[in-house]
Image: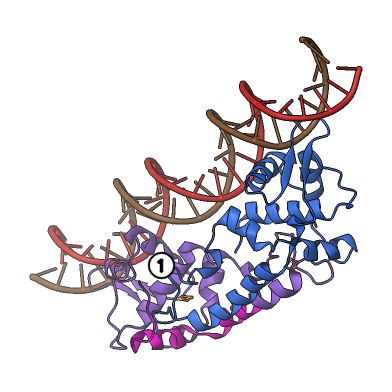
Chain colours: A blue, B purple, C brown, D red
Amino acid sequence: MLSNTCKTAIKAVIYLASKDESDEKSGVKEIARYINASEHTVSKILQTLARQKIINSIKGPTGGFYITTKQRKQPIITIVDTIDGKDLFDECGLGLSKCSSSHPCPIHDEYKKGREVIQKLFRTKTINVLCEPVESGLAYLIG
Amino acid sequence: MLSNTCKTAIKAVIYLASKDESDEKSGVKEIARYINASEHTVSKILQTLARQKIINSIKGPTGGFYITTKQRKQPIITIVDTIDGKDLFDECGLGLSKCSSSHPCPIHDEYKKGREVIQKLFRTKTINVLCEPVESGLAYLIG
DNA sequence: AGAATAAAAGTACTTAATTACTTTTAATAG
DNA sequence: CTATTAAAAGTAATTAAGTACTTTTATTCT
Ligand code: FES
Ligand code: FES
């Protein structure tokens, strides 16, 4: 469904948001270590997200990545759109050029139902909402 | 979700099954042309499926690929298992090594619901059932 | 101002998926 | 039995995703 890069992106952002509101910035090393991903990969991803204003970055010593209260209210589909492209959830399950009920593939009806459940999740759950269970220890970003 | 190879595999098999029961074998060229895919790719895929006895092949002139009435009753998950691997539908949406409700990622609950709708489709729909709408012109394999 | 820090940006390498090509083998027809 | 046909099998080339390395730039602290 999502590319590995995109999964890492979401985990990195959730980690960033699940840090104390005391707003300390996080360095790439810290983030990569925590979500158990390659430092270089995380670096590239966060740069892209910062360019899109989904998160923020500051250079120099005491610099790092951080996310504002306002930005935490974004649904995670914004991350997916940036990393994996806009119409990931509009694709046909059998690879037809366009998923449409007027020219459907044989699995269209059922596939679309499942796809839309997942799509809705990404559209409605905000970064905020998803980092709550992580903060309270009910959900995990690694393992 | 599925790899492109796997999508092509499913379309090739449905095409094979949606041919007249008059049981003429189909050549790779014919199949590839019809589902609009690379001849070489289709060739490799069908060889794999034939080795797994999901379809059959016969060499030589008048040879080709075909599928028996019995084989048509297989659910399409058998194709997915062969091409994309057994546990495609058990994977965590955020890439945790194992999807489990006792160690869930933050999107687990919703993601699992959608994934299971799609999984069920692949588990229950047989080749037979899916080629019906194609035969009657209600669904398409190309376009 | 100068040294140190950390992200930004650009480049290069590695791996896996996909597609293309070549040779071999089995079956049929003449 | 020989030539022909089509899949099988093996190999090679291409492409894209992911990962690693290097240089540059902005910021802070001394
Ligand atoms: S047309 Fe294939 S999923 Fe909609
Ligand atoms: S643990 Fe992530 S989807 Fe189940």
Number of residues whose C-alpha sits closer than 10 Å to that of mark 1, classed few (under 14), some (14–19) or many (20 or more) = few
Q: Is residue A90 magenta?
A: no
Q: Quadrant of residue A7?
A: bottom right
Ligand 2 is found in the corner quadrant, namely: bottom right
- Choose top left, top right, bottom left or bottom right for residue D13: top left
Please provide percent x and percent y for residue A19: 86, 52
Name the image quarter holding the N terminus of chain B: bottom right
Q: Residue at x 29, y 77 (%)?
A: B25
Is B93 situated above or below A112? above
Q: Is residue B64 visible in this depiction of the protein?
A: yes
Q: Chain of mark 1?
A: A
Query: What residue sits 59% from the left and 58% below the top?
Result: A81
Q: Is residue B136 above or below residue B15?
A: below
At x 44% / y 77%, what residue is drawn?
A: A100
Q: Please, what secondary structure does the residue beneath circle 1 have? A: loop
Residue B132 forms part of the magenta stretch: yes
Query: Residues in magenta?
Result: B116-140
| Residue C19 position in % (x across, y down) | 37, 54
Q: A114 or B85: nearer the eye?
A: A114
Residue situated in front as seen by the camera: B88 or B43: B88
Residue labelled with disc 1: A97
Question: Label 1 sits on what residue type?
Answer: Ser
Residue D18: x percent and y percent? 62, 47
Q: Residue A71: which quarter of the image?
A: bottom right
